[in-house]
Image (cartoon, rainbow, N blue to C red):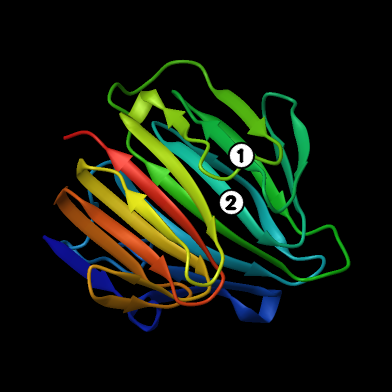
Amino acid sequence: MMDVRRTGERYRGGDPAAGIESLHAFSFGPHYDPDNLRFGAVIACNEERLAPGAGFDEHPHSHTEIVTWVVEGELTHRDSTGRTSVIRPGDVQRLSAGAGVRHVERNDGESPLVFVQMWLSPLTPGGDPVYEVVHGIADSTPYAVPEAGAMLHVRRLGAGERTAVPDAPYLYVHVVRGEVRLDGEELGPGDAVRITDAKDLEAVAVTGAELLVWEMTP
């Protein structure tokens, strides 16, 4: 079963006056929707746009796996474990909040920052915070988040290229850029598909495209 969610259907948030624009794919903050709380392990997929100098001041997280993908610009991260890093396009950042962690996310660069941040529910809550960055992840290289029973696949396709979509009980496909066709559905930037019991599916790039695909267990 496929459930297509268009970018125009996302909840708008953030603080435009402070240079923060957010689009939420799931129930989030003041936008409470009891029928849209999660899909598989995914409980949030936020598209964030930060103007130069803008950012999220220190705030807490717990019992959440947070995976960030930068589309444009540079994201500066600092957290309560003492880590500081700069995340750029092509890098995968993961913050496993464990029983509790605090962090800051800012655009300290001179260009606009665009990133997609996905939150996953862990199989077992608690534990110590864990932080990891994989710089320049290669196309088709899976990134495992075993704490959530999930695997992230990053696909970059040229126009006309095809890619198999994993067979899985739950798949969440997010189009970062470009246009693709998936099982007869035309998808553009920011569109997402929630697929249950995926089998023998294929994505075809109509234009050059970049996809984030979450493969999840029940």
Residue shown at the point (34%, 51%) measured from the top left: 164
Q: Which mark is residue 22?
A: none
Q: Nearer the viewer, residue 188 or 205?
A: 205
Q: Could you say where residue 175 lies in the image, as x and y percent from the top left?
A: 45, 66
The outermost residue toward the top is: 127
Residue 52 figure quarter: bottom right
Q: Label 2 near label 1: C-beta < 8 Å?
A: yes
Residue shown at the point (44%, 29%) measured from the top left: 144
Q: Which residue is mark 1?
A: 93
Q: Indicate the quadrant containing the C terminus: top left, top right, bottom left or bottom right.
A: top left
Q: Nearer the viewer, residue 113 or 77?
A: 113
| Element class at badge 1 | strand
Residue 126 figure quarter: top left
Q: State the CA–CA distance, disc 1 to disc 2.
A: 7 Å
Position of residue 115 in the picture relative to residue 12 (left or right) = right
Q: Which mark is residue 69?
A: 2
For marks 1 and 2, the one nearer the N-term is 2
Q: Nearer the viewer, residue 37 or 8?
A: 8
Q: Nearer the viewer, residue 204 or 215?
A: 204
Residue shown at the point (62%, 40%) measured from the top left: 138
The outermost residue toward the front is: 160
Q: Could you say where residue 37 lies in the image, as x and y percent from the top left?
A: 23, 55
Q: Could you say where residue 94 lies in the image, as x and y percent from the top left?
A: 56, 35
Identity of the amino acid at label 2?
A: Trp
| Element class at badge 2 | strand
Q: Indicate the quadrant containing the N terminus: top left, top right, bottom left or bottom right.
A: bottom left
> How many residues crowd mark 2 within 10 Å: few (<14), some (14–19), many (20+)?
many
Position of residue 52 in the picture relative to residue 49 (left or right) = right
Position of residue 95 in the picture relative to residue 214 (left or right) = right
Residue shown at the point (77%, 37%) measured from the top left: 85
Identity of the amino acid at label 1?
A: Gln
